[in-house]
Amino acid sequence: MAKGVPAIVLAAGASSRLGQHKALVRWGDETLVGRAVRLLKQSNCSPIIVVTRSELQIDVMLSSPDSTIVVNPSPEDGRTGSLQVGLLSLLSELGRTPRRVLVTPVDRCGWNEDTITTLLDCDSNTSPIPSGHPLLLCEIEKVLSLAKDSSLRDSIEIQRIQASGEHMNIDTPADLEALQ
């Protein structure tokens, strides 16, 4: 199954449209970051890296104790910059470049363990339909060579496959209300 497949949770965004930090939004009895880490751990992903911003470091750590917390010193550089911070941390921790990494933004939370199982049957950059995340990333070195503000979607080819889950994107107060 997912044994040995590392994962990165992206939780460094400013959350300006939502008005509160997405990583710490509660869904049921857990935060979005805690939920992502729990599902990745249950899928035997290891290690799990959470990339966040400095002011959230402690709260994110308390919400996701089964992960390594990494601070992006320049989160304003965008999602690809945060992914690169996570990948560099992962390379340092593993001592090598992994063949595959699962990547999920904390606010794209419509996936489940079955989504991960389906993705891990793939051998190229793959995203599930309809949830859109996590992304199975196979072109690690190419992503590391991109500009920090590059659009990942525009920079690498991503195969789309049918998998369980639903499309969810927590960006606004209305999205948050629908989550409850």
Image (cartoon, rainbow, N blue to C red):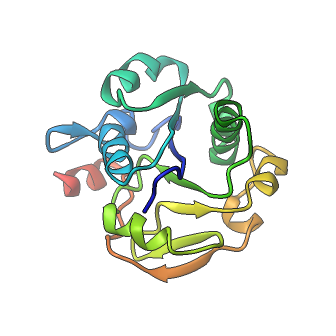
- The residue lying toward the viewer, choosing from 129 and 114, is 114
Whether residue 19 is visible, yes or no, is no
**x and y percentages locating residue 164 in the rendered image:** 33, 75
Q: Is residue 151 above or below residue 90?
A: below
**x and y percentages locating residue 99 in the rendered image:** 68, 57
**Count of marks placed on residues:** 0
Q: Quadrant of residue 86?
A: top right
Horizontal side, residue 43 vs residue 97: left or right: left
- The residue lying toward the viewer, choosing from 113 and 18, is 113
Q: Quadrant of residue 124?
A: bottom right
Horizontal side, residue 143 vs residue 26: left or right: right
Q: Quadrant of the N terminus?
A: bottom left
Q: Residue at x 65, y 34 (%)?
A: 76
**x and y percentages locating residue 47 in the rendered image:** 51, 39
**x and y percentages locating residue 49 in the rendered image:** 52, 36
Q: Residue at x 57, y 26 (%)?
A: 70
Q: Is residue 124 above or below residue 5?
A: below
* Residue lying farthest to the bottom in this orientation: 162
- The residue lying toward the viewer, choosing from 156 and 100, is 100
Whether residue 52 is visible, yes or no, is yes
Q: Is residue 18 above or below residue 64?
A: below
Q: Residue at x 36, y 54 (%)?
A: 43
